[in-house]
Amino acid sequence: MTNKDLADLLLPNVSSDIEYYENKYPARSLAPDAVVTRFAPSPTGFVHMGSLFASFIGKKAAHDSNGVFFLRIEDTDQKREVENGITGIINDLKNFDITIDEGMTGEDSEIGAYGPYLQSRRKEIYQTYVKHLLEMGLAYPCFCSPEEIEETRQIQEKRKQRIGYYGRYAKCRRLTFEEIREKVEHNESFIIRFKSPGSFDNKIKVNDLVKGEIEFPENDLDIVILKSDGLPTYHFAHAVDDHLMHTTHVIRGDEWISSLPIHVQLFEALGFKAPKYAHLSPIMKEEDGKKRKLSKRKDPEAAVSFYHEKGIPVPAVKLYLMTIANTNFEQWYDCNKDKTLDDFKFDFKKVSGSGSLFDVDKLYNISKNYISYLKAPEVYVGTLNWAQEYDPSFAEILKKHQDYATRLFNIEREQKKPRKDYSCYSMIKSQIWYMFDELYENVTDYEFQTINDIDEIKRILNMYMEKYYHSDDDKETWFNRIKDLSEELGYAREVKEYKNNPDAYKGHVGDVSTVLRVALTSRAMTPDLYEIMKLLGQDRIFSRYQDFIKGN
């Protein structure tokens, strides 16, 4: 009997006309150097930092070359799916401004001419290519039960041999057509395996865009390509999909690097041109002087929810991701402050082959710099958006005092070196709470410094209100009045005067300013005191000082 007879016996209602699909999905009309790549997760949970990193690189590489970045959902292992898993993935990408050109846009929606982009809806396509392999003599049915496979594995372990279905252990490879037909007629369950033409003693070389040239033993495993439910395995679906979708670059974690011999062999057997591969090393974390892989279980920063909860702006996260994606980005960015991330060209040659170190402190520093250069209305919107999800009561205060809060965010912002108080939106409330009367009620903890005698503090406050406060003062006049107040109370007008002759004074003008600051805000460290006073206004300043005097 012929291979075609075998193919018709196993897949009687399936066409083997692969030319239909070759014509249906023609080559893309793109420049020769355009990158076409994909993010291809399983709908088994939400995106974590490693996946976000890979998708970020994929989009960047594609768009830098006027190529295509698409989202394919690999759901052939349907036992591991979670409810609304596709929606979760899509939302996670959107929340980090990782937009797609093609692919899944919802649980049941997609865009693009190379779909379906959900693998479970491509079942007929895979079966056509499996039947094609059967007709070529490059595939066969396997009737081994899970118990038989396990028994073989145990034998291999005892003999200290490689685990797998190959060589003399691939017993169904030797079944005759008559034996196969009898089993099929008795409705015995079967899977279909690839008939590997490889030898483990041979070596193959693959040029990885990140790792460089890698040498492997040739694949000789007869891997499963079609499961008993009619769906393909990851390896086979990967080859068929990336061929028909004209993927030029496969960007993925290096846990898949051991699969390269299988994938290269499948592409060759199917007559496909293999894509270029870029295997990313895992993101590392330093702990107790040692490096380890960033862990979804141990490290909160491994979950993308961490960045939303902290309120780290998405552009800041993307800037940080680029610093660990390309080793030359930081230097470029330092020299091109007037340019954006889109102006930087991603280079596979500049990706670390050994794994980048994830530094949360560095991320916060990048975020702090980013926020410092935003306009005050942008800081207001970013803070409000965060608060509406994570601190609704603070959000109500911000909405109630929008103009006031925006002016507060503008203190020491529009200057050559803006203040860098906020590393993320979640910490802003702790930095400015004292500026809102709703949050300032019943304050009892004051961070007084050098001057901490209550009677002296009251004397300073009373004299300032009675004699030296003028609401229409400009900053220079205002500070000169603070100097006058200091001098009248026995403090040096200048810090230098005090340092030159400390025994002649109680302290200096800075000490007096600190009293005015702390009694007004409870904090020793705040933005510019003059700007704070102008924003609060006389009534609120006097009310707070009088409340302090009465309460102490």
Image (cartoon, helix red, strand yellow):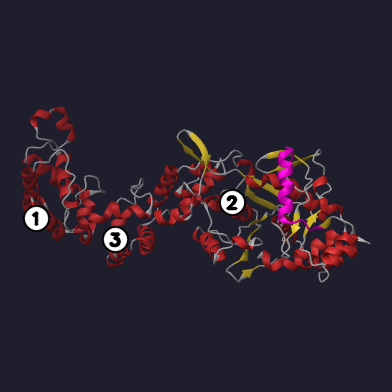
Image coordinates of residue 480 in percent, x first then y, are 15, 45
Sort mark 2 into few (<14), some (14-19) or many (20+) by Cα contacts within 10 Å: many
The one nearer the camera, 146 or 298, is 146
* Magenta-highlighted residues: 141-162
Q: Say which element carries label 3.
A: helix
Question: Which of the 4 quarters of the picture holds residue 281?
Answer: top right
Local packing at callout 1 (Cα closer than 10 Å; few below 14, some 14-19, many 20+) is some
Residue 477 in sight from this viewpoint: no
**Which residue position is annotated with label 2?**
54
Residue type highlighted by circle 2: Ala
**Structural crowding at the residue carrying mark 3, measured as other residues with C-alpha within 10 Å and reported as few (<14), some (14–19) or many (≥20):** many
Comes first in the chain, label 1 or label 2 = 2
Camera-nearest residue between 230 and 319:
230
Rounded to the nearest angstrom, the CA distance separating label 1 from label 2 is 58 Å
User: Which element type, helix, strand or loop, lies under badge 2?
Assistant: helix
> In terms of sequence position, does the residue under pointer 1 or pointer 3 come before the other?
3
Secondary element at tag 1: helix
Mark 1 against mark 2, which lies toward the viewer? 2
What residue is drawn where x is 77% and y is 68%?
24
Residue 487 locus on image (x, y percent) = 9, 39
Tag 1: residue type?
Answer: Gln
Q: Is residue 530 magenta?
A: no
Disc 3 and disc 2 in contact, CB within 8 angstroms:
no
Q: Is residue 146 left or right of residue 387?
A: right
- Label number found at residue 407: none
Label 1 sits on residue: 546
The answer to whether the residue labelled 1 contacts the one labelled 2, judged by CB atoms less than 8 Å apart, is no
The residue indicated by pointer 3 is 405
Question: What's the distance in space between the residues labelled 1 and 3, CA to CA?
Answer: 24 Å
Q: Amino acid at mark 3?
A: Ala
